């Protein structure tokens, strides 16, 4: 996103020191755009202001994210077309070899809903990502606003303690 007219852009999270990551800055400087871009690339969740996801001079936008789970590497690729150009979106999930060639197509001949569920199994539920790691602008009160049962359920998922119930 950023100044996406000059794209494409790449965020290399491998260059960051492992641990807690903080994105901070003045208001209206793009912090929420980073969160929106991650949610869009991983889960296909469109930002609150969908007109921001596609450059006004383009027909479509494309996201690609590579992540590791245990010893396996995966790539999620999504494209989004403007409504006046068909409005379709595509989704591809692949497992990668060490040299970034495709090991397995995990989205071939599978409905998008099933692929999104596979992504949630690999990465985790987007609510866990939002509530445990990210506080979007005007959304930081969400966790404290949950009822006790919902907070308990979410904490069990975050801490992976459901198996002890």
Image (cartoon, rainbow, N blue to C red):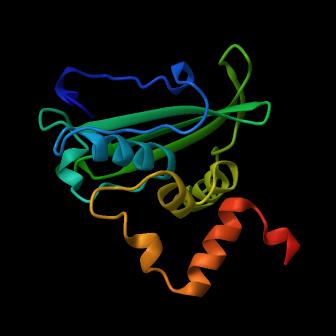
Q: Residue at x 51, y 51 (%)?
A: 133
Coordinates of residue 54 in the picture (x, y in percent): 23, 41
In the picture provided, is 110 more to the left or to the right than 47? right
In the picture provided, is 3 more to the left or to the right than 150? left
Coordinates of residue 45 in the picture (x, y in percent): 41, 56
Q: Residue at x 47, y 32 (%)?
A: 64
Q: Quadrant of the N terminus?
A: top left
Q: Quadrant of residue 163?
A: bottom right
In the picture provided, is 98 more to the left or to the right than 6? right
Q: Quadrant of the C terminus?
A: bottom right
Coordinates of residue 100 in the picture (x, y in percent): 65, 18
Q: Is residue 83 visible?
A: no
- Tell which of 15 and 123 is nearer to you: 15
Counting labels gives 0
Give the farthest residue toward the right. 164
- Tell which of 49 and 56 is nearer to you: 49
Vertical placement of residue 4 versus 38, above or below: above
Q: Residue at x 41, y 71 (%)?
A: 142
Q: Is residue 157 visible?
A: yes
Q: Quadrant of residue 20?
A: top right
In the picture provided, is 90 more to the left or to the right than 102? left
Vertical placement of residue 95 versus 106, above or below: above
Coordinates of residue 95 in the picture (x, y in percent): 70, 33
- Tell which of 38 and 93 is nearer to you: 38
Give the farthest residue toward the top. 99
Q: Residue at x 26, y 44 (%)?
A: 53
């Amino acid at each position: 996103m950023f100044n996406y007219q000059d794209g494409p852009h790449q965020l290399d999270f491998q260059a960051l020191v492992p641990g807690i990551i903080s994105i901070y800055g003045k208001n209206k400087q793009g912090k929420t755009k980073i969160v929106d871009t991650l949610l869009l690339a991983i889960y296909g969740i469109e930002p609150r202001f969908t007109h921001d996801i596609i450059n006004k001079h383009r027909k479509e936008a494309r996201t690609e994210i590579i992540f590791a789970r245990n010893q396996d590497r995966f790539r999620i690729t999504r494209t989004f077309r403007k409504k006046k150009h068909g409005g379709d979106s595509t989704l591809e999930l692949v497992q990668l070899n060490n040299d970034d060639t495709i090991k397995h197509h995990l989205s071939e001949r599978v409905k998008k809903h099933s692929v999104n569920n596979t992504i949630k199994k690999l990465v985790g539920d987007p609510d866990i990502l939002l509530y445990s790691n990210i506080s979007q602008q005007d959304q930081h009160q969400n966790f404290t606003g949950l009822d006790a049962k919902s907070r308990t359920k979410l904490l069990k998922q975050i801490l992976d303690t459901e198996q002890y119930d």
